[in-house]
Image (cartoon, rainbow, N blue to C red):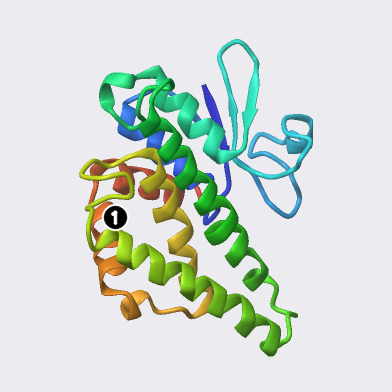
Amino acid sequence: MKLYYAPDTCSLSPHIVLRELGLEFELVKVDNRSKLTADGRDFRTINPKGYVAALELDNGQILTEGPAIVQYLADLKPERGLAPRADSWARVRLQEWLNFITTEIHAGSAPLFNSTLPEDVRSIFREKLFRRFDFLQDTLNENAYLTGPSFSVADAYLFTVLGWCKFFSIELNRWPVLTAYRENIYARPAVQAALLAEASQLA
């Protein structure tokens, strides 16, 4: 398999999951501005949407969209418990979390990357995001992870998008439970390995 990624983007989530599962894969870096891969290809010929992540399977199929990718990967090794069985109510709950992260945290923070956004508009997006953080704080005050006592693909995704707060000058210390949650995930060997691998390819 090949994972097409760009540093500091949502592609970190499937990268973490690949390492958590111990699957063999190749990392292919994508330049988000030029849309060229590290080996000189036009990334849009791989994913016409033009953004990472994209997972190229050994049979040549391309899978895009982070939540779909991480569920596909988790199902390759169900014994690792990163996602409940596909026919279970617990799986529906996992999908609920993945959709919440996608629409409310990922998409909710994306406008803040726009440096030309007026401050009054930025504050509206920040305040909405803060309400979502309040909700997460309440949830994680009762559970170690989003779906209960065990790490799941949803946690890999939330860890990734929470990492963007540093770009918006948002201090997570305001939500101590959320801060501790992220630090706990940061310490996982697979997370450390993914971050190190991406950092080593920055040059």
Residue at point 42% right, 39% down?
94
Please state which of residues 116 and 98 is positioned toward the viewer in this rendering. 98
Judge whether residue 10 can be spotted in this image. no
x then y, percent, for residue 95: 48, 38
Q: In percent of the image, x 75 and y 80: which residue is there?
A: 116
- Crowding near the residue tagged with mark 1, few <14, some 14–19, many ≥20 C-alpha atoms within 10 Å: some
Where residue 163 appears, x then y in whole percent? 44, 62
At 41% from the left edge and 31% from the top edge, which residue is drawn? 91
Q: Is residue 30 left or right of residue 27?
A: right
- Give left or right: position of 151 versus 15: left
* Residue 57, image x, y percentages: 57, 18
The answer to whether any part of residue 79 appears in the image is yes
Q: How many marks?
A: 1
Q: Is residue 81 left or right of residue 49?
A: left
The percent coordinates of residue 123 (x first, y second) are 61, 84
In the rendered view, would you say 162 is above or below 26? below
Q: Residue at x 36, y 33 (%)?
A: 90
Helix, strand or loop status at disc 1: helix
Q: Toward the viewer: 40 or 134?
A: 134
Residue 148 position (above or below residue 105): above
- Give the residue type at disc 1: Tyr
Q: Nearer the viewer, residue 70 or 94?
A: 94
Residue where numbered disc 1 is placed? 186
